[in-house]
Amino acid sequence: MYTISPKCPNCGAALPSGSTDCQYCGARIELAPTLQQMRLLGFPCPNCGTLADKGSRFCSNCGQTLLIKCPGCRTDIPLSAHVCPKCGLNRAAVALIREAEEKRKSIDSQTTTRLEQVQQQIAQHESLRRVKDRLSLEAERLEVDAAQLGQTASNLSGRAAAILGAAFVIPLAFCVLVHLATAALGKGNAWGISCLGGIPAFLVVAAVSARHYVESQNARRKADTLRNKASDMRTPDAWRKYATPDETKAIETVFEWGKQEESRILQESEAERAKVDRWLEESFNALK
Ligand SMILES: [Zn+2]
Ligand SMILES: [Zn+2]
Ligand SMILES: [Zn+2]
């Protein structure tokens, strides 16, 4: 079927078929009886809608001033002038550029939405979710173990401190006992000698305290290791490290699909933008 691509008889812009007004210069138009071109009917008064002739400065019906400000030089120019007589700016061209920008923006926002949807589909995909759920369970278990180890560590270090206290008390008691015993046996008051035996007793008890302390440090280190592993398992990319080969394969298939989807969407977006560029160029060339 032969369709006429309507062109505004005033400014020359290509219009959507069926247009009765030019959205670029404001002209009222109609399809000419020959069906070959559009015919200019006039310019609707912004106040009462009465059609005014090209170049009219006042509405013949309500007297409204038919002037608008040129978007380029801010001079008042006739409503019907699509080219500013003062600065030469083509209002229709400005409107076309603005429209192209809107079209590009809408394409871009649609593209962004579609890309986000792909990312969402990947994130919610069963094969990835299953691994994430498993890792999160394991991480929870590790955190429980870490908490228990932490408790053990603080018990051990508490015990180490208590034993170290005893390391001072026990040799002293030993010292006093030996002194009292030797005194009772009538062997003089040799404090120094009595207390010599306290030194090995101190060393033994101090060594036990030190062992508890070392064990508590070990437990604390182990707890830290488990906690670090648990938080590592909770990172978004943890599956790369912790998934089984089968799980990895399934997930990579999903990612591969996502990559293809994204490149298809980007290609479509590029094509849409190219269409806008072509449309703008053609429309520009058509302008009077
Ligand atoms: Zn027009
Ligand atoms: Zn009017
Ligand atoms: Zn101007």
Image: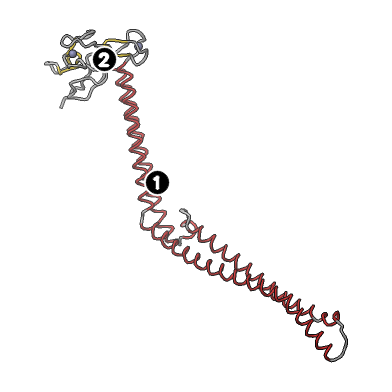
Q: Is residue 79 above or below residue 129?
A: above
Residue furthest bottom as drawn: 185
Up-down relation of residue 274 to residue 264 (above or below): above
Q: Quadrant of residue 40?
A: top left
Q: Residue 197 lies in what quarter of the image?
A: bottom right
Dot 1 lies on which element? helix
Q: Nearer the viewer, mark 1 or mark 2?
A: 2
Q: Which mark is residue 11?
A: 2
Q: Quadrant of residue 184?
A: bottom right
Mark 2 residue CB less than 8 A from any atom of ligand 1: yes
Q: Residue at x 88, y 86 (%)?
A: 188
Q: Position of residue 154 (x, y in %)?
A: 60, 69
Question: Which element is circle 2 on?
Answer: loop
Q: Position of residue 34 (x, y in %)?
A: 12, 16
Neighbourhood count class around disc 2 (C-alpha, 10 Å): few under 14, some 14–19, many 20 upward: many
Mark 1 highlights which residue? 259
